[in-house]
Amino acid sequence: MTLATQPLYLPAMVQASSASIPATTPRSRPRPKDVLELLKPVTWFPPMWAFMCGVVSSGVPLGERWPFLIAGMLLAGPLVCGTSQAVNDWFDRDVDSINEPDRPIPSGRVPGRWGLYVAMAGTLLSLLVAALIGPVVLAATVLGLILAWAYSTPFPRLKQSGIWGPATTGFAYEGLTWFTGAAVMVGGFPDSRIVALLLLYSLGAHGIMTLNDFKAIEGDRQMGIRSLPAVLGPDRAARIACLVMGLPQLVVVGLLFHWGLPIHGGFVGLGVALQIIFMHRLLADPRGRAPWYNATGVLTYVLGMLVSAIGVGSLM
């Protein structure tokens, strides 16, 4: 081959090889599996657990309102929680294009404005299902969806605050879904003792959400998100998280004893004691052991929720 013929030969080879490769065009609509990934099914468990705590705390036999129970579980998990994940991914698409380029929106698997359309459709469907269940559930769902959008939208973007961000997610994931579970079963506003429990566990969940922020300290600092670990550092943030998780549970223990439920109060107190042991180990290396605590201390926390719900349910 001479240098004179090489330029003629190479384009011919490229043209031939290109003809054998089918042209790819950008996807115009997402596949169902990509929409499902956008809704993050792994995140549905915490609100569905809290929902079941609400169901149990109502004291109403499951068989009496099972259609409402199924509708409520769908509302708490795939609908409201899934919608909140779609909202968050849509408004975080620029950040995800840097940190998580394989997510459905930045990767182009959910193209154009489909992420926003999914979030809007989820919002409307959630409201429809909630309205079919009852007015109290609808009111709770409206509040939950408002918080979901306020958490992620450019204004007020509550996730930028180390105080309001965890408070919003804690209240939405634990308190509102617990409330919804109880309201679905009683067909109205739950008992004041149920409301007291769900508010206390929502407050404690603020600490859990703070620990979740440990995995993104550098990114939060670069993006101007003022999470407690990013602003205060891991050591101080971990101490605050432990305090916020522990104190509400101690109040729960006191209430359970006050309501004549010493066995349930004792079990929850034992869980708090185990958490204190776990917290001592966490504080020795907050950043490195935050995931470990989420698998140990948080487990005893949510088990305490269930024990409390069972106890209060026995009084109804």
Image (cartoon, rainbow, N blue to C red):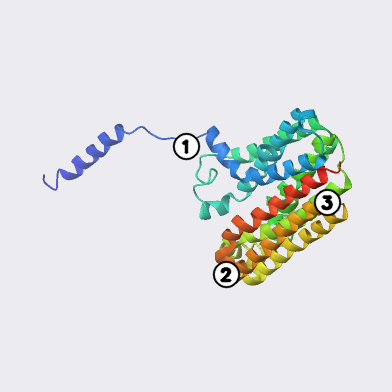
Q: Residue at x 67, y 44 (%)?
A: 84
Q: Is residue 70 above or below residue 211?
A: above
Q: Residue flagged by tag 3: what amino acid is it? A: Leu
Estimate how packed mark 1 is, as few (under 14), some (14 to 19) or many (20 or more) residues with alpha carbons within 10 Å: few
Q: Nearer the viewer, mark 1 or mark 3?
A: 3
Please say if the residues under marks 1 and 3 sit with CB atoms less than 8 Å apart. Answer: no
**Quick one: 159 or 223, which is closer to the camera?**
159
Dividing the picture into quadrants, the one containing residue 246 is bottom right
Q: Residue at x 74, y 33 (%)?
A: 69
Q: Which residue is mark 3?
A: 261
Q: At numbered mark 1, what does the secondary structure look like: helix, strand or loop?
A: loop
> Alpha carbon of mark 2 to alpha carbon of mark 3: how far?
37 Å
**Quick one: 147 or 69, which is closer to the camera?**
69
Q: At numbered mark 2, what does the secondary structure look like: helix, strand or loop?
A: loop
Q: Is residue 214 above or below residue 144?
A: below
**Is 69 displayed left or right of 284 in the figure?**
right
Q: Nearer the viewer, mark 2 or mark 3?
A: 3
Q: Which residue is mark 1?
A: 26
Please say if the residues under marks 2 and 1 sit with CB atoms less than 8 Å apart. Answer: no
Dividing the picture into quadrants, the one containing residue 184 is top right
Q: Which mark is residue 285?
A: 2
Residue 209 place in picture, x, y as percent: 67, 57
Q: Is residue 182 above or below residue 200?
A: above
Q: Residue flagged by tag 2: what amino acid is it? A: Asp
Where's the C terminus, which quadrant?
Answer: top right
Residue 144 place in picture, x, y as percent: 76, 45
Estimate how packed mark 2 is, as few (under 14), some (14 to 19) or many (20 or more) residues with alpha carbons within 10 Å: few
Dividing the picture into quadrants, the one containing residue 116 is top right
**Quick one: 268 or 226, which is closer to the camera?**
268
Residue 55 place in picture, x, y as percent: 77, 39
